[in-house]
Image (cartoon, coloured by chain):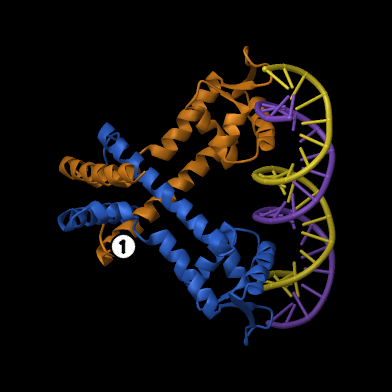
Chain colours: A blue, B orange, C purple, D yellow
Amino acid sequence: MAPHAPEELTETWRYLVELLSMQRERFMTTAATLGLTPAHAGALRLLGQLDACPMRLLAEGLRCDASNVTAIVDRLEERGLVERRSDGRDRRVKLVIVTEAGRQAQAHLEAALFEPPPALGVLDDDERAQLARLVAKVRGALDAAG
Amino acid sequence: MAPHAPEELTETWRYLVELLSMQRERFMTTAATLGLTPAHAGALRLLGQLDACPMRLLAEGLRCDASNVTAIVDRLEERGLVERRSDGRDRRVKLVIVTEAGRQAQAHLEAALFEPPPALGVLDDDERAQLARLVAKVRGALDAAG
DNA sequence: TATTGTTATACTCTATAACTATA
DNA sequence: TATAGTTATAGAGTATAACAATA
C-alpha cells in the first residue's frame, strides 16, 4: 500500500467517481421508466440472484426491516413482476418468484447498471486490454483484502 | 463509438461499479459519523463550492423543493456547521455561510468521496500513469459529448 | 405582479411493536 | 418458546399550496 495517495491518482479517481455517478443516474432513470422507485428496483435486482427467495432473506439483502418487504413485494406483485408462492416444507414462509415480465425488467436494470457507458468506446483494443488488466489487478488486491 | 461493448469491457466496467459502491458506503458511513443524513451531507458538500449560497440556489443544486431547504439548513445551523446571513442588496434572500466547523466536516466528506481506495495502492508508478492516461482519454470524450 | 423564504399539509419510505399462523 | 409474514403506527424525507416580506 502506498503511504498516501499521489495527487495524480486522486485526480484519476475523481474522474472515475464522476463517471460512475452518471451510471447511478442512468439506473434511477431506467427504474423510473419501469414505474419503480429505487427501492423497488433494488429489490427486483436482488431477486435476480435467487430462483425462489423467502421474504425474510429479501429483507436481509435489502438491509431493511422485514415489515417493509411486505409492501415492496405487494407493489411488485401488482405490477405482475413477481408472485408469492407458499413453501411446501415450511408453511410459514412465502417464496417470491420472478415472473417473465419481471425477468425483462431485471434485464433492463442490469444493463443500466453494468453496461459500459458510451464514453468508453473511445478506447481502442489495446487500451481496453490495458484498462482490463489494471482493473483486474486492483480487484485482485480487493479480494485479497476481503 | 464501438457498435456494441465487448465482453471484456463489460467485465471491467462491472468491477469498477462494484468499487464505486464501496465508495458510496464510505461516504454514508462518514456522514453518519458526523451525525448527518446523506441529504444533509450532500447539502454541506454542495456548499463547499460557493462562499455564500442563497437558499434558492441550494435547492436547485440539491434538486429538491425550496421548502425542504429550510429544514435542512435549520439542522446544519443547529450543529454549528453553517450560518444564515442576510444579503445586503436583496433583503428577501438569505445566504448560507459555512462555518469553520463546517469546513472541517466538508473536508471529511470530500475525502470519503474522492480519496482513492486503498486497493488502488497495488498499482506501481507505470500502471498509475497508464490508468491516468486512459481515464483522461475517456473523460475527454465525455466532455466532448456534453 | 413576481420572487424569496417559510409554514401547513399530505404522501412516501423506513423502523418498532404487536399480532397470526405456523414450527 | 421461537420464527415468518403481516398489520398498526410513528418518525423522517420530500412535494404542493398558501402566506409574509420584499422587489
Question: In the displayed structure, would residue B46 be above or below residue A28?
Answer: above
Q: Is residue A94 visible?
A: yes
Which amino acid does the dot numbered 1 rest on?
Thr
Question: In the displayed structure, would residue B128 be above or below residue B55?
Answer: below
Q: Residue A76 location, x and y as percent?
A: 62, 70
Looking at this view, is A60 or A49 the one in front? A49
Q: Residue at x 48, y 47 (%)?
A: B25
Q: Residue at x 31, y 47 (%)?
A: B119
Q: Is residue A137 visible?
A: no
> Residue extending furthest bottom?
A88
Quadrant in which residue C11 is drawn: bottom right
Looking at this view, is A5 or A112 the one in front? A112
> Residue extending furthest top?
B88
**The residue tagged with tag 1: helix, strand or loop?**
helix
Q: Which quadrant of the rendered structure holds the C terminus of chain B?
A: top left
Q: Residue B43 location, x and y as percent?
A: 56, 34
**Chain on which label 1 sits:** B
Looking at this view, is A134 or A142 the one in front? A134
Disc 1 target residue: B10
Q: Which quadrant of the rendered structure holds the N terminus of chain B?
A: bottom left
Give the number of marks. Answer: 1
Quadrant in which residue B83 is drawn: top right
Q: Residue at x 62, y 13 (%)?
A: B89
Q: Residue A54 location, x and y as percent?
A: 60, 74
Question: In the displayed structure, would residue A58 be above or below residue A118?
Answer: below
Mark 1: give few (<14), some (14-19) or many (20+) Cα within 10 Å: some
Q: Residue at x 48, y 57 (%)?
A: A27
